[in-house]
Amino acid sequence: MNTAKRRARRIRAIWVAVGSAAVLLYSLGPLLWIFIASITPELKADFNQAWLSNRQVTYFPSEPTLANYGALFETVPFATYFRNSSIIATGNMVLTLVVASLGAYGFVRFRFFGRSSFLVAMLVAYTIPSVVLLVPLLVIFRTYGLNNTHLGMILAEATHSAPFVLLLMINYFSTLPRDLDEAAQVDGCSRLKVLWRIILPLSLPGLVAGGLLAFIMTWNNFLFAFLLTSTAEVKTLPVIMRQFALGEPAVWGISAAGALVSTLPVALIFLLFQRMLMSGLAAGAVKG
Amino acid sequence: MAQVNLRKVVKRFGDVEVVRGIDLTIADKEFVALVGPSGCGKSTTLRMIAGLEEISDGDILIDGKVVTDFAPKDRDIAMVFQSYALYPHMTVRENMSFGLKQQRMAKAEIDTRVDEAARILNIEDLLDRKPKALSGGQRQRVAMGRAIVRQPKVFLFDEPLSNLDAQLRVQMRTEIKRLRQKVRTTTVYVTHDQVEALTLADRIVVMNKGRIEQIGTPHELYHEPQTRFVAGFIGSPSMNFIPAAIEQRGDKLALLLKDPDLSFEIPAERHNRYAGLAGRSDLLLGLRPEHFSAAAGEPRPGHGQFETRIDITEPVGIETFVYFVLAGTEICARLPPTAGAQEGKPLRLAADLTQMHVIDPVTGLVV
Ligand SMILES: Nc1ncnc2c1ncn2[C@@H]1O[C@H](COP(=O)(O)OP(=O)(O)OP(=O)(O)O)[C@@H](O)[C@H]1O
Ligand SMILES: [Mg+2]
């Protein structure tokens, strides 16, 4: 009886392990492929062959090399693009968090005229495809001299991350009992101070999740970076990735190296904050 | 150290008037309890004093100053919440010093105050814990400590003990009383537990449906309730209300009950009070369970004896609650266990009419 139960449990454990391995392979496989490509030396273009097949397919290069990584920073302005991505993604993250927490606090704690219509408007704003915003954004940029500036790009990116994170924070703040606000008010806090000293510290997982989402949205956003900018001074990583693929011949090795380097920050942040991220997305983690 | 005045204070939520014009003066250092049934507006009144709820009409004064438009932080009050509302991300010490830090008090002074309060409340060992790691009773103490260290003008309590189990509640009640001997601050204490109000308060405010029914000392409310509501609300088990009539008999007044037909002589000292009611047959006799006793021999002066059949007995140790029917109403009496009450058996009882109340059901007032 007992041994049968134990065996059943062991068999189930094996199945779980096999399943996890499959999922892992499926999601990490492409990454592995990109890694291999990035250490495969770039071949001299062979114009007798069709442009796509100018390299051999191997599972592991016979002479692995880091030359592609060197080329990435020497022959293309990759560093500039990386810097732009960092500035715009970080800026958008900060702006989004400020707007979203102030807004969410207002929505959760105050009853005001038009409150629910505003909420619906936020939802709608989030569902508007970014393409629709391109022309108005360009007009606004021209009017206020924001063309090809980091600030302009940050403001543009916030149009889609702020509504989303706002909804996330509304969800999060609603789980905090109102008594806490009131206790802090009686203890001598203004509303803003309540938000800063009580609500935000208690919402840390939510803030981390919201901030990361905003960061990644911008980091990966190709559309705005491509269409709203005209100089390399503000172009971001997704734009250069496209240029690699469009080249003739396409520089697959450098492209793969670039892909890995641009994935790195996001992956690192995920690893650092994964615990908070999970509980933040699940919401309601804090309870007296 | 401050007086609190409420002047015609009204609270409306939309069209619903929840607090309907309250006038109340709470003296410096006085402990006032607000009691009343659920939904009568106790918490709303307290929250208006705290500034957590806007006032629809009227004025509130603290220490002689109109604070109606002041934010809670500018009123110099401290509040203990039913849920305790301890900040979960702070230790007990941080919780208690939070309010003082907002006032930018010197760190040394903060520490002295927190240590002092922790000593009074017996929570010195808990200062470095987070609220999550505390029991209900300990959280309750921390919540009180957070209020004490502030040394505010007014303490506000909203049902601070109702989340504790019965035994702990009684213990904390005594604790609050003891605390009160050391820290005398003007206090408004909301509770729906009348025993808490009776034991703690200097004066009790009984509220009903957004209005004040009566304000008085515990003794006054118990012995001289002014309305039927107060008479029924204060005291446990509550006062019995028995349909009755009053008749003039020569130069005496008689109290008549029906079913069985009983006639008691009203004590002479009440004659003046009830003379105007002679001939009325729609009155209510109010008599507390403790004012019944087992009859022995001739009726004592002011007592009326009658024979009844006991329906139910509830022995609770030191006394027995006895239920029977008189004048078509179920009556509860508190008798000593030695009274010999047995279910289904007849018993002769005496009603102490010197403690009687007569209620005019038309006005709902105690005559
Ligand atoms: N924010 C609000 N909006 C609308 N109605 C409210 C609001 N707050 C309270 N009320 C209503 O006001 C009335 C009084 O509420 P209050 O909380 O003061 O009652 P209470 O006497 O404290 O009762 P309890 O003993 O149950 O705590 C209730 O009928 C309640 O439904
Ligand atoms: Mg209440």
Image (tube, grey):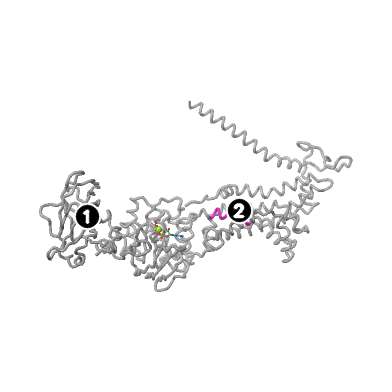
From this viewpoint, which residue is outermost toward the left?
B298
Q: Which mark, by number, is residue B37?
A: none
Q: Is residue A81 left or right of residue B263?
A: right
| Prevailing secondary structure of the magenta residues | helix
Looking at the rendered image, the quarter that the N terminus of chain B falls into is bottom left
For the residue with label 1, is its CB less than 8 Å from the closest atom of ligand 1? no
Q: Secondary structure at mark 1?
A: helix
The chain identifier of the residue carrying mark 1 reads B
- Looking at the picture, does residue A244 appear above or below residue B85? above
Residue B219 percent location from the top left of the image: 26, 63
Residue A228 location, quadrant? bottom right
Q: Secondary structure at mark 2?
A: helix
Residue B284 percent location from the top left of the image: 24, 59
Ligand 2 shown in quarter:
bottom left
Q: Amino acid at mark 2?
A: Gly
Which residue, given by chain and number where applicable, does mark 2 sit on?
Answer: A210
Q: Residues within 10 Å of mark 1 (few under 14, many from 20)?
A: many
- Looking at the picture, does residue B161 appear above or below residue A189? above
Residue B338 percent location from the top left of the image: 17, 47
Which residue, given by chain and number where applicable, does mark 1 sit on?
Answer: B290
Magenta residues span A162-173
Q: Is residue A138 left or right of residue B200?
A: right
Between B218 and B110, which is closer to the camera in this rendering?
A: B218
Q: How many marks?
A: 2
Looking at the image, can residue B318 be seen? no
Residue B330 percent location from the top left of the image: 25, 51
Looking at the rendered image, the quarter that the C terminus of chain B falls into is bottom left
Q: Amino acid at mark 1?
A: Glu
- Looking at the picture, does residue A16 appear above or below residue A200? above
Q: State whether discs 1 and 2 lie on one chain.
A: no
Instruction: Tell me if residue A170 is in the magenta stretch.
Output: yes
- Residue drawn 70% across and 39% down? A29
